[in-house]
Amino acid sequence: MKRKILLAVIVSILGAGAPWLLPRAEARVSLEKCTLCHSKSEFRKILVDGKIRELFVTADSLKGSVHEKKNCVDCHFDISEIPHRERPRRVNCTHCHYKGNAEGAPQSDAYLAYFDSVHGKAIARGNVKAPLCQDCHGSHAILKAKNEESAVSQKKVAETCGHCHIEIYAQYKTSIHGVAVAKGIREAPSCTGCHGEHKIYGHLDPKSTVYATHVAEQCSTCHASVSIMGKFGIETEQVATYKNSFHGVASQFGSRTVANCASCHGTHDIRPAEDPLSSVNPKNVPKTCGKCHPGANPNFAVGKMHIDAKKKEAGVVYYVASFFKYLTIGTMLALIAHILLDMYGRSKRLRGEK
Amino acid sequence: MSVESRESASVVRMSLMFRIQHILLMGTLLVLALTGFALMYHDNWLGSALIRLEGGVLFRGFIHCTAAVLLMAQMVFHAFYMLFTREGKRELKDFLLGKQDFADFSQAIRFNLGTASEYPRFGKYGYKEKFQYWGATVGTLLISVTGVILWAENISMKILPKIFLDITLIIHGYQGLLAFVILLFWHVYNEHLHPSVFPMNRAWLTGKVDAEWLRQEHPLEYEKLKQEEVL
């Protein structure tokens, strides 16, 4: 009798454990089953529009990626029979990627910003061309963004965005920032440096980091930093002098039509002023200013654009400002002295009259 | 000076036309100062509060330019009034600067320092009033020129290099500040705190001053009026 009870206990323990053991075994089987077809190098599908869809996947496809330990059906969980008759649905990453998940995915909700972003909203409106997670992060070979080989690494993300934003990518690649990133300068901004990662908004959306009135703020995150700019010998006062200019003040107090950094320097095509293609090259300045101030003369480009009247580098402007400063102080002192003298003199005059 | 001899009679010092011009000038200058300094000192809390109060940076500019047009119109009107009306011509004559004014100025200083025995005797307008009047006139002309250059920035940019506009802006702002503090200090002292008028010379409202005040501060004018038997 005791034996039977013991046996029952052992069986029930094994039974309880079985469901835990079973999926692993099944999954392994499933991977093998998937690769039966998908690991054939010729496995592809010709789509209606004539494009070819590569369906080649091997057991090594996930190797080295962040999902190394996952199996096909962990993501393609809508596959219930093999071979599958229907085209599997696009993988839904939020199945595992949410705060509090038990799958071992990073405990982060950062991606939630995607749904409010220009891309997320385009998807929600039914734009099939708008990117989902895998369009930027890759599908099987997903690597951490810190990894240089990742599709969303600082070095590679521009190319990734360029899959859709081709013209912008071409402009950016030859810009000062694009060249710097290609050289391996970690501080230089790639697309995400200015536009943000998941929370990308259209530049006409007031929430955007590159909305007209936010541009100066966004550029200043790097360009006002002595520790970053010092490495490359770039001045950091450009932001402060802009903010004190007519343009800067108007922008600060809500004008959306006034010039911000990008209006003169460009956006994706920013180049150093020495570059003849730069919009702020002295030769191009009249044209650049002329966008808003029709007929700006070539003479206008003479001299420094970003000036601080309080600093000697401003030249004549500094001396004029200093002259007025001392003139005002001097006049005030003379006035006060005269007033005090006059009061003293008047009391003397009154005493004399008495 | 005994109490009995004090006269309670009053004389007109500012006619209605001048009082209106003075009040308009005061109004436009105050608006120009408030809107101008808001921009000049936009980086401190008072400046930014003023810009917001003035309906944002664009409306601030609109107010500033409107007040400037009013000020310039007044200046032209005043010039015509002073040159071509009987009252204007008389006042202008009283306001003309002469050697005597600089002599008065130096004598006043010397008296106050104790090296001259007599205080200068002024006509209707002493050196204080004249310096203030001509200073304000020249200042208004200059600040109008720089202001128009900045206002018509698209035309200015066709002709001038940027550095010229930078300097123009500096001059416009600092000159405004200079004019503002001089007007403020001068008025606070001469029209408010000066013991003969404390707490305020009301001539700018009523147009009238006490004959006794005139006798003390502008004796030549007092004697002239006595002669003309106005008093």
Image: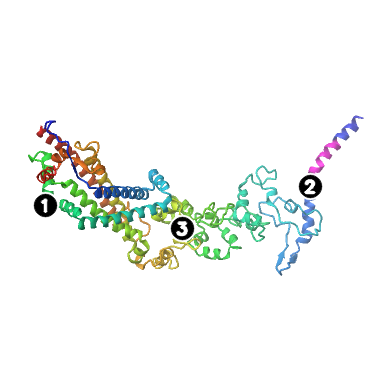
| Picture coordinates of residue A81, whole percent (x, y) | 82, 55
From this viewpoint, which residue is outermost toward the left? B117
Secondary element under disc 3, as helix, strand or loop, is: loop
Up-down relation of residue B191 to residue A146 (above or below) = above
Q: Which mark is residue A23?
A: 2
Viewer-side label of 2, 3: 3
From this viewpoint, which residue is outermost toward the top? A2
Q: Chain of mark 1?
A: B
Tell me which amino acid carries mark 3.
Thr
Secondary element under disc 1, as helix, strand or loop, is: helix
Tell me which amino acid carries mark 1.
Lys
Q: Counting residues from the N terminus, which is met first, the one under dot 2 or under dot 3?
A: 2
Say which residue label 3 marks. A257
| Picture coordinates of residue A98, whole percent (x, y) | 66, 46
Q: Which residues are magenta?
A: A10-25
Q: Is residue A18 magenta?
A: yes
Asked if labels 2 and 1 share a chain, the reply is: no
Left or right of residue A318: residue B223: left
Mark 2 Cα within 10 Å, few/some/many (few <14, many 20+)? Answer: few
Res A306 seen here: yes
Mark 1 Cα within 10 Å, few/some/many (few <14, many 20+)? Answer: few
Say which residue label 1 marks. B99
Res A240 seen here: no
